[in-house]
Image (spheres, rainbow, N blue to C red):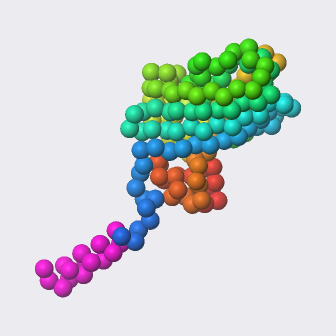
Amino acid sequence: MGKTGFSVFAVAALWAVLSPAGSAQSNTLTLFGSGSGAFETPPLASAGVATATCTLNRATVEISCTTRVHNIVNLTAGHLHVGGPGTAGPVVLGINGLPLGSSDDFVHSWTWRESDLTLRAAQGVLKMADVFESCASGNCYLNFHTAANASGEVRINLCPQGEDTRYANQFYLINVCRPDR
């Protein structure tokens, strides 16, 4: 190998070692959010509050979530919607196994698969990968509904966890939850 070939090889090897780890895509992404009636569209006064952690898994095409909901009265439903903060979006996944009628605090865990998806062609949701992309960019939310607030009582906007830099989101290398980055 000549000097030129060796120099190109050395520069390429050095670049590979020094380039940020965030440039490779990961198979999982963890989302986190906390919410209340203040995040509903329009906002409402409610004692209900909640937190959620969800993991998107590209390899298994699943979303696994755990929520902690407090001060809810007469729970009627829960869903995942696509839509950014401050906008109402369509339901794409229903939360099964909720303690419907509950008027207390609860913790609930579940997993969604592609077969659970409600297609929304008008919004571009045709497969689970479309939901992954929306959620990875901060454009999805969980919503818990009650008899008193059928359109939603507690909204949790979900954002990628560990968003210290744009490249912390290794799932799609985008960051809408923190657009300043």
User: Residue 138: percent from the left, percent from the top?
Assistant: 60, 44
Q: Quadrant of the C terminus?
A: bottom right
Along the line of sight, which residue is nearer the eye, 120 or 158?
A: 158
Give the percent coordinates (x, y) of residue 180.
64, 59
Question: What secondary structure characterizes most of the magenta part?
Answer: helix
Residue 22: percent from the left, percent from the top? 46, 59
Residue drawn at 58 percent across, 53 percent down: 162
- Left or right placement of residue 46 versus residue 174 in this view: right
Q: Residue at x 60, y 23 (%)?
A: 95
In x, y percent, where is residue 106? Answer: 70, 26
Residue in view at x 60 percent, y 39 percent: 53
Seen in the image, is 44 located left or right of residue 109?
right
The quadrant of the rendering that contains the N terminus is bottom left
Total numbered labels: 0
Residue 109 lies in magenta, yes or no? Answer: no
- Residue 2 magenta: yes
- Tell me which segment is drawn in magenta: 1-16
State the residue lying farthest toward the right: 45
Which residue is farthest bottom?
3
